[in-house]
Image: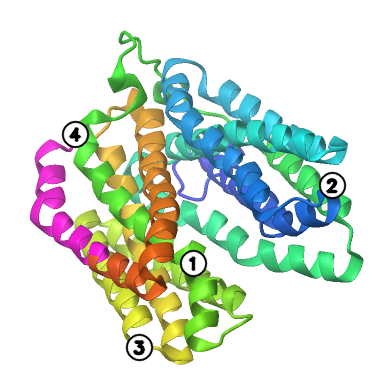
Amino acid sequence: MAEHAHKDSLWNRNYIRVMIANFAIYFSFYLVTPLLPIYLSDSFNATKDSIGLVLSGYTLASLLFRPVSGYLLDSFNRKKLLLICLFFYFLCFGGYLLATSLLVFAFFRTIHGAPFGASTVANNTVAIDVLPQDRRDEGIGYYGLSNNFATAIAPSVGLFIYHHYHNFNLLFILSFVIAGLGFIVNTKTTISPKECIPNKAPFSLHRLVLTRAWLTGVNVAFFGFCFGVLSSYLAIYGQDKLNITSGTGTFFLLFAIGLIISRITGVHGLKHGLITRNIAEGVIASSFGYLLFISVTHPIAYYLSALIIGLGNGHMYPGFQNMMIHMAHPNERGTATSTMLTSWDVGQGLGILIGGIISEHMGYSFAFWSIAILHILGSILFFAFTRKFYLKFKLS
């Protein structure tokens, strides 16, 4: 009876469970990720090139498996697939404890990317399924708070443990346990049968990518590219231009605070269906933040830009996600979710790659001016085309 009484509530038990699981996924991930270069260097005497190669395998596996996971989620039982993904995700942390060489660690790290990519898509899709239809837009906005909180505090917790105990196995065990708790919590999640009608359409490109929302994906990739460059090279830029040697953590903390604030304030607009307005506010704020970052070479501007970019991204990211969902049928939610996440990842990955090439040949200032201009072009794309494209082709 208690479960029934809460079934139409935004904060129903199932939604809270997937929020907890999402927090566990991202907390366990970011608890160890910032310290892996140190671990590989200290434990295996890995060079910078080999460290980059080992860590990039995870990203590549995640990127490749996300479209496949979207297809599987729309074709088969979503809860069973979610639990399978979460089980293998937490199990892979145990592989880090077994790694006795760089090659073995690289193997476990690479295969870990597949269940991570699949788990984020599956958990996100199930979150949409368990939300009441009239609270779905609002619920998607709140859902991101769980990973925002995780990414804001997990690196600091990991660094604290490392500096006090200098024990990487302790970090791996903690990530293993937290990811396992996320799996256990989601074993109790229930999904209404009407939300899980399998997609029986023949296999095609449409089953892997929500081609109906292709322009939205391109627009998301624009902004992912900009963040990829910023997140990867801001530490070196800050050190070279502003003599900020230890401010990267503070930058990302302020960025996370901006994300959290804007998600909380932005759900009011999402609740009333003002999706395009939320995105418009977000892209304008983020564009201003990028311009501030590169045009004013002062520590205050450096940190203030982090907060502003966070505020902008916290508005536009859930807005774009809602766009994807509204352009998909209920049995295409997995594909819509994977398309959203993959679009961002592709943009971010290209930003890391091309940003490095530009920085090497033209300098970091040129690279950051480039993404500030590109972000403005992405904003123009949204106002001129993507917004109208969405209003024309949305299904609900």
Q: Amino acid at mark 2?
A: Ile
The answer to whether 113 is drawn above or below residue 365 in the figure is above
CA distance for labels 1 and 3 = 17 Å
Image quadrant in which the C terminus is located: top left
Circle 4 packing at 10 Å, graded few (<14), some (14-19), many (20+), is few
Residue that badge 3 annotates: 296
Residue at point 22%, 37% (across, down): 214
Kind of residue at badge 4: Leu
Q: Is residue 209 magenta?
A: no
Q: Amino acid at mark 3?
A: Val
In the image, which is nearer the foreground, mark 4 or mark 3?
3
Sequence-earlier tag: 4 or 2: 2
Instruction: Write down the residue under mark 4.
Output: 395
- Residue 50 appears anywhere in the view: yes
- How far apart in space, not on screen, are marks 1 and 4 (Cα)? 40 Å
**Disc 4/disc 3 C-alpha distance (Å):** 44 Å
User: Which of the two discs, 2 and 1, labels the residue nearer the N terminus?
Assistant: 2
- The span from disc 4 to disc 2 (Cα, nearest Å) is 45 Å
Residue at the spot of label 2: 173
Hey, which residue is sitting farthest front in the picture? 361
Residue 314 in view: no
Task: Tell me the residue at 8%/56% (across/down).
Answer: 384
Does the CB distance between marks 1 and 4 fall below 8 Å? no
Q: Which label is found at residue 321?
A: none
The residue carrying pointer 3 sits among few (fewer than 14), some (14 to 19) or many (20 or more) residues within 10 Å by Cα, namely few
Determine whether 226 is above or below 220 in the image: below
- Magenta stretch: give its range: 374-396
Q: Earlier in the sequence, mark 1 or mark 4?
A: 1
Give the class, few, some or many, for how many residues have Cα within 10 Å of label 1's Cα (few <14, many ≥20). some
Specify the quadrant of the image occupied by residue 271: bottom left
Q: Secondary structure at mark 4?
A: loop
Dot 1: element: helix
